[in-house]
Image: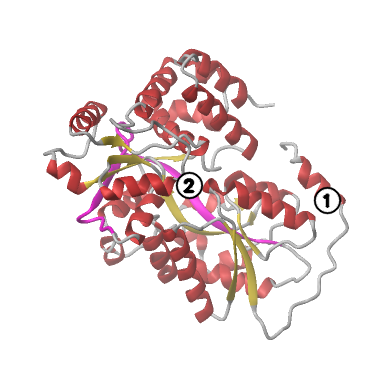
Amino acid sequence: MTALPAWIGLLLALPGPGLAQPAASTPSLDVLHWWTSASERRAADQLRTVLATAGVQWNDAAIPGGGGMAAVKVLKSRVLLGDPPDVAQLIGSTLTEWADVGLVLPLNAVATRQKWSQTLFPTVLSLVSYKGDVIAAPLGVHRINTLLYNRHLLQQLGLRPPHSWAEFEGVARAVSAAGLKPLAWSDEAWQIATVFESLLLSEAGPALYQEMIQQRKSAAWLDPRVEKALLRLRWLRSLSGPGSDGPAERAWTLSARELMDGSAAMMIMGDWARGELMAWGASPYTDFGCVVVPGTEHMHLYSVDTLAMLVNARHPVALQEKMAETLSALPTQLAYNRIKGSVPVRRDLSAAARNGLDGCARDSWDTFAAPGSARVPSLAHRMAADEATKDAVAQALWRYLTDPRMDAQEAQKRLAAVIHLP
């Protein structure tokens, strides 16, 4: 078993909390998460409304910060102080770390009653299962390898959305010639990693990606296809557009604003950006559209939203189970994911429900559901590596991209070193 993080060892050495029990007349759950953008806030409010109807009060504890890094720090602090929330947004490897030390409430009874083995995608059920227990309630599947574009801008310039890198380069040249920015960009490390893993999948394919990311084989990072992905990453960053101050570290929502107002033609980002555009009033039918990142057709680079029920002195087990049941219900799934930009974790959508998805969402769900598709876990969003590895890779990419003196082969060596299994 992988060594547990030091903070968890410290937690286990602390005495149990002696918290006062809340009044029995207030059936509420304290929920810690990092959904704070416009669309994320709307999606969380949708869950709160549905849960209230089911008799569960959602006490919001939202922590702002892209990628959830700040929220994870707050969560650790609260647990160490003996005041853990009842529910927390825990995903990927961080979820299993908490389950490993008995801090997560098993949801086996809920999974049995709701027939999750029959209704959820097997990939999703596997993700929320650990050592024979179901350890979280899955909410939605995000697609990372998404290329969004401004429909109006491309139409005005007589351009079509690109389906290959040659077409992408043609669109970029035409947009630059018109004095506009081809690609919205941010130098935040997690956003660089988000773009890079899509490029890596495009250039290397799912088999080599698995060796590099999931099996963590250092030698695989020295493959020439990785160099191509790094060179393309640097080229994409150069598309800052005339008159721009150049790339900067900024929130992904600012890049999405550029896409919406037409100052940028395209954006590579997880499909939560679709939810944000819709929250601002843009339509996926008339204002923006999306295709997969060139070279990743029939591939789904995924991240899954999950909420874990935490063990604490309040012991609100019945309420936590009711929440998990409500979150997995089909009406909740459809309503939440329509706002969030993701797609339901359920594989039993009816034809009518599937046809009710917009084109971007339908292609995402269809690809994830198709037996022949490559379903690939995201590194940048905690699906394929622990927090420390994810951060180390993101920082190595940031250093490569912001230091013009470092060539791609040197970056490969550094990435090979940080990805190596201890």
Q: Residue at x 75, y 37 (%)?
A: 3
Magenta residues, start to end: 282-310
* Disc 1, SS: helix
Residue assigned mark 2: 303
| Residue 209, position as x, y percentages in the image | 46, 29
Which quadrant does the C terminus fall into? top right
Q: Residue at x 47, y 24 (%)?
A: 401
Q: CA distance from mark 1 to mark 2?
A: 29 Å
Q: Amino acid at mark 2?
A: Ser
Residue assigned mark 1: 12
Compared across the picture, whether 257 is left or right of 91 comes to: left
| Residue 177, position as x, y percentages in the image | 18, 29
| Residue 270, position as x, y percentages in the image | 41, 45
Q: Residue at x 81, y 45 (%)?
A: 9
Q: Amino acid at mark 1?
A: Leu
Q: Is residue 280 above or below residue 226?
A: below
